[in-house]
Amino acid sequence: MAPSTTTSMSSTTTSSTATATCLNISPGKNGYLPPEACDVILYYVPSFAAAVLFCVFYGMTTLLHGIQAVMFKKAYSWVVIMGGAWELLAFIFRTLQTRQQNNENWDTYYVLFFLLAPIWINAFLYMTLGRMIHFFLLEQKLVGISARRFGVLFVCLDVFAFIVQVSGAILASNQDNGNLVMTGLHIYMGGIGLQEAFILCFTGLAIHLHRKLIKMEASEDVYNGKLSQGPFSWRWLFHVLYFALAMITIRIIFRISQYAQGTSPTNSILTHEWYEYVFDAVPMLLALVALNVIHPGRILQGPDSGFQQVRRAEKEAKKEKKQQKKMAKEEKKSQKKTAKEEKRRQKKEGSRDLEVIVEGSPLRAHANEEERLSNSEQQWPRYHERDGRYEDTRYHGYQI
């Protein structure tokens, strides 16, 4: 985190450019300013070689994580790739800053990416343990929490800690207001404190799962072939998980101790660059490399190694439900159409019954049903006694 722009002076100066708290000094080589300068950003000269070296290291491990994500078909590995990419971006901006030490933009970008990148690595560990629960446990639950909800729960907590840390980091990167810098540092420390609290809870649950799998492996009544498959033992995945959590914890303790002393030049952590490399950059690099060596894809193999099947089943169920709903809607529409056509047909037949036969028509129509019933009693042909002949009353003028 960048130090405050003002520092207290132990003695007065006779320079015409001096103020009560700092000196207006022109930047030296690569923009260097001494701690007593008014516009100072760093209390030390940053190493160009170290920044470039860590760009190479983080670039290599991030590239390898991308290859392993494709090789082991672990789509969720994009999370750890983001963590490595943010670390890489941080040291790219750090490299630029070594050539322009008084450039606030490079310092702000470096601080934001460097402080927030471990959040992604932490989230990847949470998601990995959720998939381990899904893979190894028949009930796919731990302490009553389903595997999917387990990962989502801790990722949401991680996002909350992320938001708190981002807010603090943005405020602390403000070089124009010393009060905002201190407020931002306190908020940031609160955020990483929350992150560590979540890590401790998560570690306890991981240990619980670890012990449960050990009992399953030793039990003769419960057999789980997944505990013995693959080229690596399932225990290695727990070991690398504990190692990565330990590296993140070391980094959190360092950051809390760093900013607990404030941003004055008397804080030795702020006046020596090697602290950030040893207690932040190196632990995060080791965590990423450890996840390269024992990638979750080496242990979690097979159709149950992820949530793809669960998502596929949910999509199929949703698709089937949607199709059933569509069919029911079409059937209802068809019934409505049939009823409408039947109503129209009945109406049309009723109008036909009321039609009057045009004169000269060969057929005689009856006005209504009552008339038909009354005429149904008549017999054809009908005999006329007076004329002594038969007449078929269905036709006009035709005699038989």
Image (cartoon, rainbow, N blue to C red):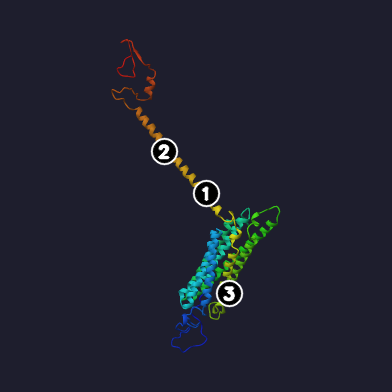
Mark 2, Cα crowd under 10 Å, few <14 / some 14-19 / many 20+, is: few
| Residue 234 in picture, x, y percent from top left | 64, 60
Relative horizontal placement of residue 389, taking residue 187 as reference (left or right): left
Question: In the image, what residue type sits under mark 3?
Answer: Val
Q: Which residue is the site of mark 1?
A: 316
Name the mark on residue 337. 2
SS at badge 2: helix
Q: Nearer the viewer, mark 3 or mark 2?
A: 3
92 vs 38: above or below: above
The image shows residue 239 at horizontal and vertical percentages of 63, 64
Q: Position of residue 263 (x, y in %)?
A: 53, 77
Q: Is residue 336 something that shows in the picture?
A: yes
Q: Looking at the image, is mark 1 or mark 2 earlier in the sequence?
A: 1
The residue under label 1 is which amino acid type? Glu
| Residue picked out by circle 3 | 278
| Residue pictured at 53% horizontal, 64% vertical | 81
Of the image marks 3 and 1, the number of the one nearer the N terminus = 3
Rounded to the nearest angstrom, the CA distance separating label 3 from label 1 is: 50 Å
Q: Residues within 10 Å of mark 3 (few under 14, many from 20)?
A: few
Q: Earlier in the sequence, mark 3 or mark 2?
A: 3
**Dots 3, 2 in contact, CB < 8 A:** no
In the image, is 222 to the left or to the right of 73? right
